[in-house]
Amino acid sequence: MPKHPRRVVRETAVEQEARLNFRLDPEIKALIERAAHYSGETVTSYAVSTLVRDARKVVQEHEVTTLSDRDRDLFLALLDNPPEPNDALRRAAARYREMITGNENP
């Protein structure tokens, strides 16, 4: 147990300086207040936890790819034994190399 619990509370409050401000339709505000009440949370706590939960879900949907077992096995097999590059890939690599280095030669 810390010797100065009030100091810990103050330090925590200082770390949470970022703010979001927005206006709401009065009916939406009342709905959020009711939901917070039913959840046993303050409006701020309810709003933050709901926004964070939804934000994590949206980010995961855009940044995480979930493969089926079949696709995972195929992906790993291709990593272990990659096919030879085809003509389209060779041309794309040459265009990229030229764009980056200004030189057509490898």
Image: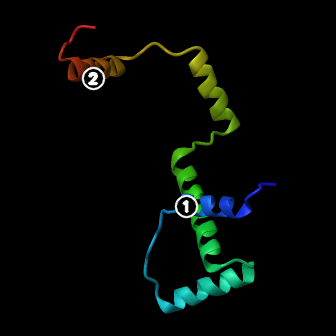
Which quadrant of the structure image shows residue 8? bottom right
Mark 2 or 1, nearer chain start: 1
Determine whether, in the image, residue 38 is placed left or right of residue 51: right
Q: Which residue is mark 1?
A: 14
**In this picture, is 9 found above or below 101?**
below
The front one of 76 and 70 is 76
Which residue is the extreme one toward the right?
1
The front one of 2 and 72 is 2
The quadrant of the picture occupied by the N terminus is bottom right
Which residue is the extreme one toward the left?
102
Could you say where residue 26 lies in the image, as x and y percent from the top left? Answer: 50, 91
Which one is in front in this view, the residue at disc 2 or the one at disc 1? 1
Kind of residue sitting beneath label 1: Val
Q: Residue at x 51, y 50 (%)?
A: 62
Q: Residue at x 61, y 58 (%)?
A: 11
Could you say where residue 17 lies in the image, as x and y percent from the top left? Answer: 50, 63
Label 1: which secondary element: helix
Label 2: which secondary element: helix
Kind of residue sitting beneath label 2: Tyr
Which quadrant of the structure image shows residue 21? bottom left
For the image shown, how many numbered marks are present on the structure? 2
Q: Which residue is mark 2?
A: 96
Determine whether, in the image, residue 91 is placed left or right of residue 47: left
Q: Residue at x 62, y 20 (%)?
A: 77
